[in-house]
Image (cartoon, coloured by chain):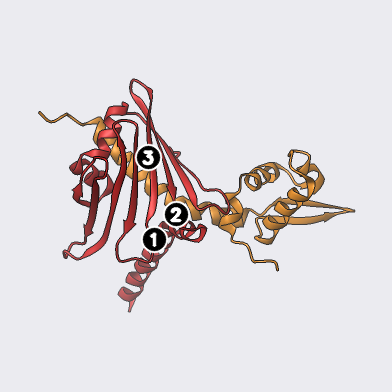
Chain colours: A orange, B red
Amino acid sequence: MNLRRDVFQAIADPTRRAILLLVASQSMTAGAIAANFDTARPTVSKHLQILTECELLAQEQNGREIYYHLNLNKMKEIADFLEPFRKLWDDRFNTLETIMKNYTPKE
Amino acid sequence: MALKTRINAEDGKQDLVITREFDLPLALLFRAYTEPDIVAQWMGTNVLKLDSIQHGSYQFETTDAQGNVVFRANGVIHEFVPEQKITRTFEMENTSFPVQLEFLEFESLSDDTSKLTMHIVYKSVEHRDQVLKLPFAQGLNMAYNRLQDVVSQLN
C-alpha cells in the first residue's frame, strides 16, 4: 500500500532535504543525484519517489533520460508551513534577549 | 533579517530540537528561565507558579482582555542543575495534546554569548507534527478571522 505522504514529513528527512538542495540549481538525473550520496541507489530512488509524490520534485523526459527539478511553487508552500513555528520561538527568544540585556539584578 | 532560531525535526521521529544562540552570558540566559516575572514577559503569559528546583513545578495562564482564560499549561521539573540543565514536562490544559518531555541544556560559548538546546519528546510522531503545525494553523485562523472582519464590514 502506498500511503499518501505528508509534504511536511517529506522535508523533515535530512537526505531528502539534501536532494532538494542538489537539484535547486540544476535539473539532474536519478543517477547523477545518487552519485552524491553514500546511500544505496534504491534508497535514493525511494526518496526521489516520495519527493515526486508530494510534488516537491517534478520529472521531465529528455530523450531517454528523466530529469528531476524543483517544483518552486510547492517549495514555497512548505517554507511557509514550518516558518510560523520557528518564528514563534524566534520572537520569544528575541524578547528574552532584549529583556536580559537590560536586566539589573535585584538587591 | 535571518532568524537565529533553528528547528530540527526529522522525518518519522517523535521529537524535535530547537537551538538558539544568545548575545547573553550564560548566567543571564539561565536567569530568564528561573525568575517568574521575567518568564512571564518573554513567554507572554502569566506565571501562576514557578518552583525552579528539583521536583518543583510550574503553571502558566493567559487571559484575554475580558479576563477569560485562553491558555493554561503546567508541568513538573524533574531535574534542575543551575546554568546547565532543566528537565521538565509541559502540558497544555483542556486540549487533546498529551504531556511532552523537555530537556533544556544551557551552555556558555564565550563571556557574553550562550546557547540553549531544547529537546522535546512527544507521545507520538503524529502528536509532534500536530504541535509543529499549530502556529501555522493559528496563523491561518487569524488571517481567516481578519478576512471575515473585513467582509462583515463590507456588508
Give the CA separation, mark 1 to mark 3. Answer: 19 Å
Q: Amino acid at mark 1?
A: Pro
Tell me what residue is drawn at x 34 percent, y 50 percent.
Answer: B89
Question: Up-down: is A16 above or below B66?
Answer: above
Q: Is residue B93 left or right of residue A9?
A: left
Give the amino acid at mark 2. Answer: Tyr
Q: Earlier in the sequence, mark 2 or mark 3?
A: 3
Labels 1 and 3: the sequence-earlier one: 1
Mark number for residue B104? 3
**Which subunit holds the residue at mark 3?**
B
Residue visible at 29% across and 49% down in the picture: B76
A60 sits to left or right of B125: right
Q: Of the residues under marks 2 and 1, which one precedes in the sequence? A: 1
Q: Are marks 1 and 3 in contact (CB under 8 Å)?
A: no
Identify the residue position indicated by label 2 in the image: B122
Numbered mark located on residue B98 in the image: 1
Image position, residue B74 (x, y; %): 27, 54
Q: Are marks 2 and 3 on the same chain?
A: yes
Q: Quadrant of the N terminus of chain A?
A: bottom right
Q: Are marks 2 and 1 in contact (CB under 8 Å)?
A: yes
